[in-house]
Amino acid sequence: MTNQLTLKANYFLIGVIALLLAGCAFTPREAPIHQAALQHQLLSLNEWAINGKIAISHKNQGTNLSFDWQHQDPQHYVMDLSGALGQGASRLMVHQGVALLTLDDGSVHAGENADALVAKVLHWDIPLAALDYWVRGLPFPGAAYTVGYDEYHRVVTLEQQGWRIHYSAFLSVHKFELPEKLQASNGEVTLKVIIKRWELGDR
């Protein structure tokens, strides 16, 4: 009788463990509490500035640029772009939904969408609206995404809008660990970004 009770108890425990494991296997992965709080703080961080290098590869052609991005909010920012030795310098200004692109020959081009304007005039496929968030290690709002974290709760992979972003290095800036190196690819275009300096204006 004792053996039968012990056997039944063992089967019961095995069943409970199996159910727990099955539940774990189908539980969606959520952001750690620490990371969720950090994302909230980064989303509220509007005034910032970064500079560094960006390499754009598309159809076996590549472009290497230096950039300086002065950001007030997603609708108000200035980005200076230039090639080697300052050649091909251009300035993108976005103000209240209007984008102005000034080239080194003095010509000015306007558009309602900064991404489309840069692609049309400079032939660079840069998802600026999303990059605004990706450089902070954040998903672009309103679009589905999947994310992976390291043991320090930092975002190391982000997949969104057909792009896969990998973060390989971070900089300590005040209380934040902000991206220093990231690579984004959509299968046709690859962007490699190195951020040399972060400045936070409204922390």
Image (cartoon, rainbow, N blue to C red):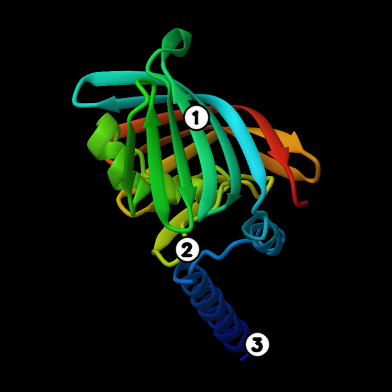
Label 2–label 1 contact, CB within 8 A: no
Q: Quadrant of residue 51?
A: top right
Mark 2 burial class by Cα count in 10 Å: few <14, some 14-19, many 20+: few
Q: Quadrant of residue 179?
A: top right
**Secondary structure beneath label 2:** loop
Decide which of tag 3 and tag 2 comes sooner along the chain.
3
> In the rendered picture of this protein, how many numbered marks are placed on residues?
3
**Secondary structure beneath label 3:** helix
Decide which of tag 2 and tag 1 comes sooner along the chain.
1
Circle 2 sits on which residue?
141
Circle 3 sits on which residue?
2
Which image quarter holds the N terminus? bottom right
Tell me if residue 31 comes above or below residue 137 in the rendering: below
**Secondary structure beneath label 1:** strand
Tell me if residue 119 comes above or below residue 97 in the rendering: above
Viewer-side residue, 43 vs 32: 43
Viewer-side residue, 168 vs 190: 190
Query: In the rendering, at what x and y percent does residue 141 appear?
Result: 47, 63
Instruction: Confirm whether residue 186 shows in the render.
Output: yes
Residue type at mark 1: give it: Asp
Query: Measuring 69% from the left and 45% from the top, which residue is drawn there?
Result: 152
Query: In the rendering, at what x and y percent does residue 86 appear?
Result: 46, 13
Dot in front, 2 or 1: 1
Dot in front, 1 or 3: 1
Residue at the limit of the structure toward the left, as seen here: 59
Dot in front, 3 or 2: 2
Circle 1 sits on which residue?
80
Residue at the limit of the structure toward the front, as seen here: 106
